[in-house]
Amino acid sequence: MVLYVAPVYLLFCTNIVLGGRLRVQGTHFVKDGQRVFLSGVNQAWINFGYDFGDNHYTQQRSKFENYLTMVHDNGGNSMRVWVHIEGQTTPVFDHQGYVVGLDKTGTFISEFKQYLKAAQKFNILIFACLWNGALFEHGEALGGLIRDTRKLHSYIDKALIPWVKAVKDEPAMGGWDIMNEFEGEIIANQHNSERCFDTVFMQGSGSGWAGAKYYAQELQRFVNWQTDAIRRTDPDALVTVGSWTARTSSDKLGLHNLWSDDCLRKAGGRPLGVLTFFTTHAYSSHDKYADYAPFNHKATEYGLDKPFVIGEFNQVSGGGKDITALFDYAYNNGYAGAWSWHLLGTGSNSDNATTQLRGLRFMRYKNDENRGGLVSFKL
Ligand SMILES: *[C@@H]1O[C@H](CO)[C@@H](O)[C@H](O)[C@H]1NC(C)=O
C-alpha cells in the first residue's frame, strides 16, 4: 500500500512545484523554490521597429527561432527584446495621437504568443522592452503618451492591457521593461524642491543625447501608469526600467534613484505602479567604467531592496575584461542577471554573437545558491 502511494504523491508534488513563475525574493529571483540568475543576451531587434505586429514576426520567424536556438544551445536562459520602440508598427495611433489598437491587422497578439511558445520550447524567458528613449526618429507619437495622460490612458486600455492579458499565463513571459535608456530624452539641470523631480545631478552626464524633451516627472508618471496597468492585470508580473547608467538607479554612492517606489508614486499617483526589479546598463569608455558602474561594485552597495540586473554590457566596452569575466563578476557580486549587447552584432558598440555565446557557455552549468544561483532551468 505504502509502495503504491509514494509514487503518486511524488508525482503530485512534482506537478505543483515545477513550472512555476519567476518571482522576486528580496534582492534575487527564485523559480520553483530555487534562486536563479538570468544569464542571457539582448536580442533587441532583427528589423528595428518592424519585428512584431502586422505579420512581421511571421515573416521573420525562422530568424527569431535561429536566435532562440543559439541562446539555448549555449546555455542562456533569458532574452531582452524590444517591441514598440517609437511606435513604428505597434501600437497604432489615430491622427490625434490616441492609441486605437496594437497593430493594424490585429495579428500582434498571436505573433507574440507564437514567439513565447517557441521560447518556451527552448527554456528561454522573454523580457519585452516596450519603448526606446535612446534614439529620436519617429518619437512624436510616443511623446504624446509621455506628456498627455489621456493619450497614455488610450495606450493602456487599447494596447497594453490586452497584451498583458493575452500573455500572462505564458511560461516564457519573463517580464516587462517599460523604457530603454530614458536618459537619452530627459531634461537635465531642472531644479525642483522635490528631490524626485530634480535633475541637476544629471548636468554634464551626457544625458539628453537624443534630444532633451521630457521632465523626470513626466517619464516617471509614464512608467508608474504602465507598471500599474501591467501589475493590475497580472499581479505576478515582473516590471523594470532599463536605465542608461546606475547614476539614476540608486540613492547610495552619491547617486540619485529616479525610479524608487516613492518617486514613481509621487509622479504618477498609482500605488501599484512601482518596479519589481531594477535594471541598469554598463559600458566602459576608453576601457574604464565610471566609478559608480556595476562592474566596480557589489550589488548590495547600491542599497536597493529589489533584484538588480545588468541589462546591457559587452566585452568591446568591457573595461578590458573578457566576456566570461564580466558574466562571472555579475554572478559572484550579487546581481540578479546579466544580458550582453547584442545578438545581432550590429554597430560599433556590440560584441559579435560568437563572443556573447562564449559568455553564455561559461555560465550555463553554474548553480551556486550562495552566489547567483541556478542558470539552466526548465519552463
Ligand atoms: C568576434 O569578436 C571577437 C572579439 O572581438 C574576435 O576575436 C572574433 O574574431 C570575432 N569573431 C567573428 C566570427 O567575427
Image: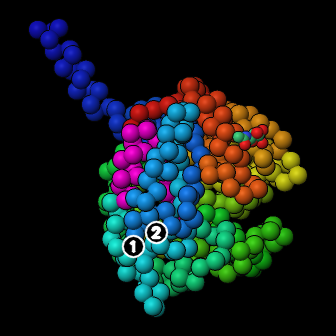
Q: Which residues are magenta?
A: 111-131
Q: Say whether residue 256 is left or right of residue 59.
A: right
Counting other residues with Cα less than 10 Å from the Cα at mark 1, is it few (<14), some (14-19), or many (20 or more)?
Answer: many
Q: CA distance from mark 2 to mark 1?
A: 18 Å
Name the residue at 21% across, 21% down.
9
Q: Earlier in the sequence, mark 2 or mark 1?
A: 1
Ligand 1 contact, mark 2 (Cβ < 8 Å): no
Q: Position of residue 163 (x, y in %)?
A: 36, 64
Above/below status of 158 relative to 237:
below
Task: Work out which residue is located at the far right of the displayed protein and give it.
Answer: 286
Instruction: Judge whether residue 112 is colored magenta.
Output: yes
Which SS class for mark 2? helix
Question: Residue 326: in sight, yes or no?
Answer: no
For badge 1, the amino acid type reads Asp
For badge 2, the amino acid type reads Gln
User: Which residue is labeled 2 in the image?
Assistant: 226
User: Which residue is labeled 1 in the image?
Assistant: 103
Q: Nearer the viewer, residue 177 or 292?
A: 177
Above/below status of 306 relative to 274:
above
Instruction: Judge whether residue 230 is colored magenta.
Output: no
Q: Position of residue 178 (x, y in %)?
A: 53, 64
Quarter of the rendered structure image containing ligand 1: top right
Q: Quadrant of the N terminus?
A: top left
